[in-house]
Image: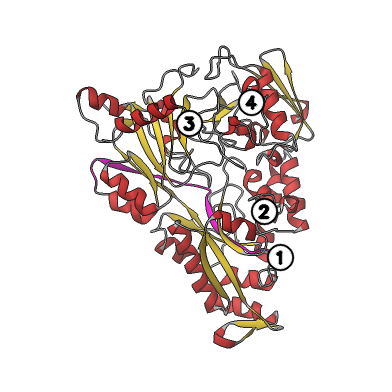
Amino acid sequence: MTTRRIRSAAAAAAFAAGVTACSAPGGGTGEGGAKAAESVVIGVGSEPDTLSPLLGYGKDGNSKIFDGLLARDTDLKLKPALASALPKIADDGRTYTYTLRDGVKFSDGEPLTAQDVVYTYRTVLDAKTNSTARSELDAIKDVRAHGDDTVVFTLKYPYAAFAARTVLPIVPEHVAGGQDPNTGDFNTRPVGTGPYVLTNWSKGEKLAFKANPHYWGGKPAVKSFTMAVIADDNVRATRLRSGDLDGAVLPPNLAATFEKDDGRRTYRAKSYDFRAVTLPTAGKVTGDRAIRRALDAAVDRQAMVDKILDGAGRPAYGPLPVDDPAYARGIERPRDLAEAERVLDEAGWKPGSGGIRAKDGQRASFTLYYPSGDKVRQDHALAYASDAKKAGIEVKVEGATWEVIEPRMKSDAVLAGFGSVGDPDFGLYTLLHSSLAGDGFNNMAHYDNPVVDDALDAGRRSQDPKVRGAAYEKIQQALVENPGYTFLTHIDHLYVLADRWDGLTTQLEPHEHGFASGPWWNIEDWQPKK
């Protein structure tokens, strides 16, 4: 998808003013200090491909430009946003009715109506729209407006987690409706109901925002903020230290260098964000189940937590962290090289030249890609290769851009990151269901296991907690016996910010973090310290 830059001279001037006001994060007294207190510059590692919810932006909530019918509080509990209350549920969980909040306007001053909600969901569900959220809304049979302030969803089947899906941001039909959702200007010039408005997007550099004068939730104390896109972790830390940034997301080793800085504070967020190696079934080597099982046994997860994450994380024995209510107890497995060797021996992978095993003339060797500039993923990849070699498997580690990696995902391994909060269905279905194999970043390993597919469908379609719990336990057990990924670690997210505001908190975070998640998830509620 081609992303167009905003070229408005007025927007550029507003952006420049915002950066000037934030150039001295230490603040101070007088007029300059007051302006600095109203502006924030945050360093993040990446930016979205689009700012359109129709293509998936903000689908899990926390967009500063848009709102959903519902939102989440600090503890991830659902609360009303554009809806005036939580939905009324009827027909045994097949009908959800929402009443809209009075007086909500989009940032262009036009009123929000129920038809905007209908347009948003129908466009996402349209097969012609390249939306990453479509499979997550599979349960919807129909969505209709009843008057200007009521929206009714009819579901194909009871979906226990449906209300949590309605944090999807709502877009204005009067703006987006006349455009192609895949290529239109709305992707880079969004109009929403959220607390902030985009004023400038310099692709690959920064995005600037200012307070939305029509925001229904009140006037934010932080009048403007900038997301500086800085892919390199070390550069982000250097710019934070120099005062060029007010805050940044950092890996554990760099966050630790700010611990004794009295002017800054470190925030640590628990997450569902895991690092894993995709093992495509189409690969000549990774397609062998014995190779996948041996790698699972050979990897030293605890060492990765201790040495790579400096303890800021947990071993990952599957896609769900060990403290999740749906986690299958008893699947923990320490490193076992003897088991890895036994599995390979029984499958006919015999030691060969240089200690690397071979079978029928095929060496146990494959390439593992990681995104360049991501030191944490690089370190995971190198540690994984070292562990694999001890079992006689050669893993050749290569850094590359996503433009290089994406065409290779079907056959080559990737050091990937995933993880969703809110419900087990949110993270597991897109990661594992065979119907989504090769669908963008969904099911990157092209995993195909009928037992897992059936359990995923049962977990999605049942409202009985016992049935759902049994389904997700079966999935996790199946991944031990027939892994499509080697799960490595669940990562804590670390953020360092100038200690100038009150009201900062962290949530339990998904894989997507930095841009939408982080202590700035509720930046509209921050207040300057007195």
Q: Nearer the viewer, residue 187 or 519?
A: 187
**Does the magenta-highlighted stretch encompass residue 250?**
no
Secondary structure of the residue carrying tag 3 is loop
Q: Which residue is mark 4?
A: 176
**Alpha carbons under labels 4 and 3: distance apart:** 19 Å
Mark 1 crowd level (few <14, some 14–19, many ≥20, 10 Å Cα): some
Disc 1: which residue: 282
Sequence order check: which comes first, mark 2 or mark 4?
4
Identified at 66% across, 62% down, the residue is: 484
* Residue interval drawn in magenta: 261-282
The x and y percentages for residue 379 are 45, 63
Disc 2: which residue = 443
316 relative position to 447: left or right: left
Q: Answer with mark 3 or mark 1, whichever residue precedes in sequence.
A: 3
Q: Label 2, secondary structure: give it.
A: loop
Q: Is residue 162 left or right of residue 34?
A: right
Point out the frontmost of discs 2 and 4. 4
Any part of residue 318 in sight = no
Q: Position of residue 53 (x, y in %)?
A: 60, 33
Q: N-terminal of the two: label 4 or label 3?
A: 3
- Give the residue at mark 3: 7
